[in-house]
Amino acid sequence: MHAIVLAAGYARRLSPLTDNCPKPLLPVRGVPLLDYVMAKVFAVPAVKAVTLVSNHRFIGHFECWLRWRRPPVPVRLLDDGTLTNETRLGGIGDLRFAVDHHDIRGDALVLAADNLFAADLAQMVTFSETRRASCVIARRLDDLKAQQRTGIAVLDGDGRLVEFQEKPQVPKSNLAVPPIYVYRQESLRRLGEYLDGGNNPDAPGNFIAWLCAREPVFGWRCDGEIWDIGNMEQYALAQERFDAAKESAFGIRPW
């Protein structure tokens, strides 16, 4: 299995902190956010290689970051060539770019580089293998404002995703979907069909919404905290409330 970490956004809502630093490298309790994310990826036995997609503006920052790390599996950095928020490829565009550029043909764990989470991704991968289908995380979230800032899943009695809403004003359920996905290789092959059809290349959840209408996609139910570092308020909240004592659950730098 290949892991693809999407880190090519420009994080305008976190300016000026992100004017000269990519969001995934901002510190949370003194540790770059990306270190937490990558530790969770490395804890998945099935993952044998990682591609991290950056924009051209910040590729040097990630090269410096990786130079001081000793990952347990190969990590390749991929420059998507963009320099501004206006010319970005978008999350789905970057995903297709990574799949095509690194000739990724098997299943893939795909996630954004800007979320803190306690979920055990190895269990999610096992769930996908058992279902023989792509899957998303479905986590209970009861706060309406928080629901409006994330993806929302509607599942049937068997756990199949029957509808996905991307940042809805009127959510149809209380099951939040963070940008963490397991894609079967058959699903990844449909990226071209999705993008060539003129669909939105930006938020990764848009592809899930399209995909679940065409093939089975399941929701893996999990508890545990997920911190979306999307704006200054959320970043400050993570700094204030993130409990370093729970670092084993969040996977702080075992590598």
Image (cartoon, rainbow, N blue to C red):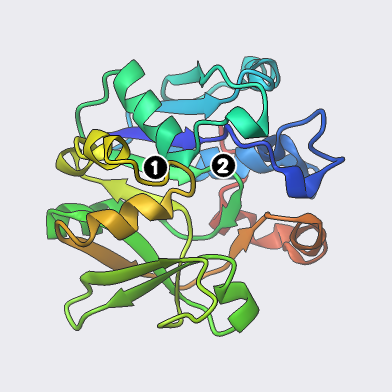
- SS at badge 1: strand
Q: List the single residue furthest toward the front.
A: 198
Could you tell me the amino acid type at mark 2?
Ala
Q: Closest to the observer: 68 or 23?
A: 23
Which of the image's four quarters has the N terminus?
top left
Give 203 or 254, whichever is nearer the viewer: 203
Quadrant of res 133 = bottom left
In 3D space, how far apart are the residues under numbered discs 2 and 1 (Cα atoms)? Answer: 10 Å
Which numbered disc covers residue 113? 2
Give the image location of residue 35, x and y in percent: 62, 38
The circle drawn on residue 136 is none
> At x 77% / y 42%, what residue is drawn?
27
* Left or right position of 154 against 132: right
Let me know if residue 45 appears in the view: no
Looking at the picture, does residue 227 appear above or below residue 158?
A: above
The image quarter containing residue 229 is: bottom right
Disc 1: which residue: 110
